[in-house]
Image (cartoon, grey):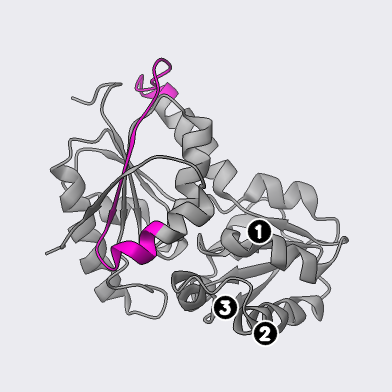
Amino acid sequence: MATKDMSIGVLDSGVGGLTVLKELRRKLPAENFIFLGDTARAPYGVRSEEEIRKFVEQMLCFFDTQNVKLVVSACNTITTLGMKTLQKAHKFGLIGMSKGEKMVLSASKKHKIGLFATQFTVNSHMHQKAYNAIDSRVQVYGVPCTKFVPLVEAGKFGTPEMAAAIMEYTDAVKRAGVDVVILGCTHFPFLQREIQKSMGPNVQVIDPAAETATDVEHYLIEEGLYKMQGTGSTVINFTGDMEKGKKLVAYGMPGEQFTFNKLTLK
């Protein structure tokens, strides 16, 4: 049986989920977190569904050994698979990335939403379906930002390659006349300021991590698993290059202290 003192697992296809981990730690400071980024096999967004499911099951089996009370999918591509289809015999709860419905629909006046995501997520049309379930007038203009993930994973912030990619993708949604852009991949909040600058002051760029953290908080309260006292700890695991992973942690959460481990998934 799950208890309040058990840790929360956070899984990701690479390093993008660190942006979600940051928001979870801010929202739930007393909780203990175990992060797992499959950096050795990133990115997932260009892989087949069968391959992604195999990798995710390996990560979930790792969390079985860690005695966690909940696992958060800090990856939109993985969330697209459906949390119920991934549950199987795993005893912990599973929560996926929010599609930012509340934030997006309250911010948009034109009902035209730009979606920056992986090819897999764009092809799923899950954001269009979620928004239309609330407001049938909403149109989603999905852009597969295939260059962003490898550039973020390589830490190429502020480079000409990154600037060119940002211009390419923002120009695509500007032509559609959107007034909101949702960052549908957890890697992309690393670039939120640059994307916002390129889009201009009349377009709001939204990171759904805050809404995801709220979903997690509500789940813990409803299940009687919400830990309110103490200061939580965080262990960060990567399957690939540790130094590259540590640099991105330092970039996204400067000055924070973590325990790092390298894992091999089977």
- Quadrant of the drawing holding the N terminus: top left
Q: Position of residue 109 (x, y in %)?
A: 85, 56
Q: CA distance from mark 2 to mark 3?
A: 12 Å
Tell me the crowding category of disc 2: few under 14, some 14 to 19, or many 20 or more residues within 10 angstroms, Cα based. Answer: few
Callout 2 amino acid: Ala
Res. 211 image quadrant: top right
Residue at horizontal 25 percent and vertical 75 percent from the top: 51
Q: Residue furthest top?
A: 229
- Foreground: 195 or 244? 244
The answer to whether residue 79 is visible is no
Does dot 2 land on a helix, a strand or a loop?
helix
Tell me the residue that label 1 is attached to. Answer: 132
Q: Secondary structure at mark 3?
A: loop
**Residue pictured at 30% horizontal, 62% vertical:** 242
What kind of residue is marked 3? Answer: Cys
Q: Residue 112: which quarter of the image?
A: bottom right
| Image position, residue 215 (x, y; %) | 50, 37
Residue 67 percent across, percent down from the top left? 18, 35
Image x and y of residue 114, in percent: 70, 68
Q: Is residue 68 left or right of residue 95?
A: left
Q: Earlier in the sequence, mark 1 or mark 3?
A: 1
**Relative height, residue 145 to residue 261 (above, below):** below
Residue, disc 2? 164
Range shown magenta: 221-246
Query: Circle 3 is placed at which residue position?
Result: 145
Q: Residue 253: say if magenta.
A: no
> Does residue 75 sit above or below 198 in this rendering?
above
